[in-house]
Each structure stands twice: as structure tokens, then as C-alpha cells.
Amino acid sequence: MTRGLIAAYRELDALCEGIEALKRRKFSKFTVYTPAPRHEIDHALKAPVSKVRLFTLIGGLCGVTFGYWMAIWTSDYWPLVVGGKAIASWIPYTIIGFEVMVLVGALSTVYGMFILSRIPKITATVGFDPRFTGSDYGIYVEAEPERLQEAEATLRETGAVEVTNER
């Protein structure tokens, strides 16, 4: 059974030091809460690259393919023969393909953001404290009961104002 600790920090530097200390001591399951996004936290966490870009790429490729297909199919189904020119020419359909690519790519990006961030969240977030939306920073650390003392000592060493048990 895992349990957790909530640590509140007032300073950003202390929070980043706490993140790095937890990583050095091999604590891998923790969540950081901040009132505003900060690049210092991103550097300390070394988060992996987001997979949303794959949704954008696949959506854009599907969109441009559908845009060209739709324009060519329409031209072949209702041909407008003008001076012996080709019925389906790719050059004028590039505009349609581009516009559909942007539309489908943008919609798939939004869809990917919702899917990967698990919105809407039905259950309450464990380890969240309303102080973390104002001025304080927080870390929620999950650990085995035997390692809770070590986690608490690590958080206090790095300048946590308050460390409380959760669950």
C-alpha cells in the first residue's frame, strides 16, 4: 500500500531543489503543483516530450489527404472541361488541401490535449491543496510506508514550510 506526503514551499528555488533531491534519492512518483507555469520547474522535472505533436502530425496528414481527395473527387464527378485542360490538376487544389490540413490538424491537436491530459477529471486530485493556486508551491510524493520518513526528511532539508501526510 502506498501513501503520500504533501510538502508546501514558499520559494521557487527551494521547490526545484526539492525536486532534484527527490530524484537523487530515487523517488519517481511525485506531482508538482504551482500557481503559474515556470520554466525552472520544467528544467528540474526534465519532463518527456509531449505526444500531442503526433496528434497534430497525423491530423495534418489526414487533413491534406482528405482535402486533395475531396477536390479531385468533386472535379471527376462533376467535370468542367475548359479548353482541353486536365480535369484534376494538383496545383489549384493545393489551397484546399492546405486549408483542410490546418483545420483537421488543429482539431486533432485540441482532441489530443484533452485525451492526454485526461480532461474532464471526474475524481478529486490526491495531494492538492488550495494554497497551491495562490502563492505557494507544492509537491505530492507517493512512497512505500517504509520510505516515508526518508521522503519527509528530504523535503524538510530542502526548505519545505510544511509536510503533511495524505491518504
Image: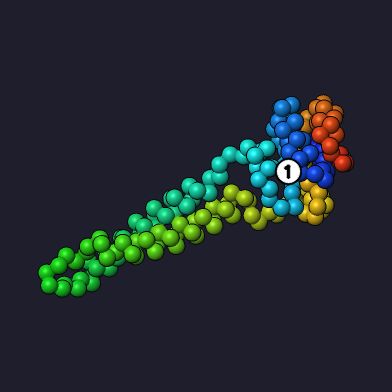
Picture layout, residue 14 above or below residue 37: above
Picture layout, residue 140 above or below residue 135: above
Q: Secondary structure at mark 1?
A: strand
Residue visible at 54% across and 56% down?
111
Decide if residue 26 is on the left or right side of residue 106: right
Q: Nearer the viewer, residue 43 or 48?
A: 43
Q: Percent x, y for residue 76? A: 22, 66
Decide if residue 75 is on the left or right side of residue 133: left
Residue 157 sits in quarter: top right
> Crowding near pointer 1: few (<14 within 10 Å), some, many (20+)?
some
Quadrant (top left/top right/bottom left/bottom right) for the N terminus: top right
Q: Nearer the viewer, residue 7 or 119?
A: 7
Residue carrying label 1: 32
Decide if residue 27 is on the left or right side of residue 7: left
Residue 134 sits in quarter: bottom right
Res. 44 in view: yes
Q: Percent x, y for residue 103? A: 44, 62
Q: Percent x, y for residue 89? A: 22, 62
Task: Report the amino acid beneath label 1.
Answer: Val
Res. 145 in view: no
Q: Percent x, y for residue 151? A: 81, 31
Residue visible at 50% across and 48% down?
53
